[in-house]
Amino acid sequence: MFDCIILGAGLAGCVLAERFASDGKRVLLLEKKEHIGGTCYDFYDKSGILVHKYGPHIFNTDNETVWKYVNRFSDFRIYHHRVLGVIEGKKVPIPFNLESLYQLFPSTYAECIENKLLDKYAMNTKVPIMELQNQDDPDLKYLANYIYEYVFLHYTQKQWGMSPEEVGGTATARIPFYISRDDRYFQNRYQGIPVNGYTDMINHIIANENIHVLLKTDYHKVIELDQLTHTIKFLGLPYNGKVIVTVPLDELFEFCFGHLPYRTLDFKFETFNTEYFQEICTVNYPNNYDFTRITEFKYMTGQVHPQTTIVKEFPKQYDWKDKSQEPYYPIPQEKNTILYNKYRTLLDEFSNVILSGRLADYKYYTMSETITNALGAFDKYCVDNIK
Ligand SMILES: Cc1cc2nc3c(=O)[nH]c(=O)nc-3n(C[C@H](O)[C@H](O)[C@H](O)COP(=O)(O)OP(=O)(O)OC[C@H]3O[C@@H](n4cnc5c(N)ncnc54)[C@H](O)[C@@H]3O)c2cc1C
């Protein structure tokens, strides 16, 4: 019998499997796909190029515990991600910074705006454009409105299929003007890519004889949560061990209150007989085309290959009936939080269930946040079991 059954073998499920197994527990890891790793999964395509099946993943964190944890299972290739955005026909650094300003505006005007910004803020400060919109200075207001219109508005509409206001005001509040010439996408202390890829790293995370992985297994086939008796059955028999849920809560409870909505993506991969396709890893297209961005994998993996593979991302509404689709981005609207909380309260009566990961929490998490939460969930379990 297993001490612990984990639903979903994404990053959250695999980190928790490792923690429990290292603590001597027998773990069953259930995964409906034919591979582990969830959305972090990468593989070599037909041309032998390492690609990320569910979109480009760059590891970035300031959390030393998380960085040390992942480095136990893989060496990392230090990689600083850079993004260009096509704005008025020019490719400029994103997030919008001083370089972008000078590339898009005449230098005297750009210099005037730079001086005005530096009168108010220190170099290397990220100023939310909402703050600039509220300034009396017409040039700073103009800059804020320009970034909103050309960098943010149409990209958001494509990504979410609705206006920024409908998505929720917080996104607008967070778009920064970065008063800096540092054109890296992330400024975190630790950034990189596992040298042999994420799948290899996660395979090392779960390489423990206490972990038994069942792929191509929908958990519904083996686990049952009885809402009347608040008991759990495993293969039809009462189960008193821990159940770790990293899968969507609405599905766990048969959608009894309705569906939690998500945005999904169609990925279009293309391979070219040329060493490189574009000048940088990711180019955003906020204002043209149906796709949001093009990413070329070799920049982040550092792979040397005479051909190259790119991926274009086409956002659309997630349809739970279409089994080929993946629920990627929870839609951060208040009505959805309310619906999620209804499902969440159903779990209060199940004392032996632990939640972790982006689907169970209905939140967008970076990989670092996913690992932080999973390690935190295990620590909480340990504290609760000492009491
Ligand atoms: C397009 C995209 C790009 C991203 N880029 C980055 C990035 O650059 N940097 C970064 O830090 N983070 C990035 N992320 C976030 C990162 O993917 C997540 O933080 C992380 O993968 C979350 O892991 P998880 O285990 O919570 O979820 P998941 O990876 O989704 O794992 C959940 C698992 O549960 C399984 N499952 C679901 N239903 C069932 C069922 N009925 N039975 C059995 N198994 C089931 C799923 O198949 C899946 O394997 C990105 C995410 C997306 C969508």
Image (spheres, helix red, strand yellow):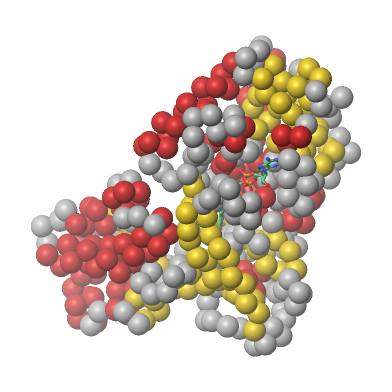
Image location of residue 311, percent across then percent down: 58, 71
Q: Which quadrant of the figure has residue 224?
A: top right
The N terminus appears in which quarter of the rendering? top right
Above or below residue 89? Residue 208 is above
Whether residue 189 is visible here, answered yes or no, is no
Q: Residue at x 21, y 57 (%)?
A: 132
Residue at (66% x, 12% y) in the render = 229
Q: Position of residue 276 (x, y in %)?
A: 61, 83
Would residue 380 be seen by someone viewing this image from the given angle? yes
| Residue 340 image point, x, y percent | 48, 32
Q: Residue at x 86, y 35 (%)?
A: 210
Q: Is residue 257 left or right of residue 236?
A: left
Direction from residue 118 to residue 6 in the image, left or right: right
Which quadrant is home to the C terminus?
top right
Is 343 displayed left or right of 383 in the figure? Answer: left
Relative to 42, residue 61 above or below? above
Q: For this rendering, which residue is in front, 306 or 294?
A: 294
Where residue 84 sits in the image (x, y, percent)? 44, 73
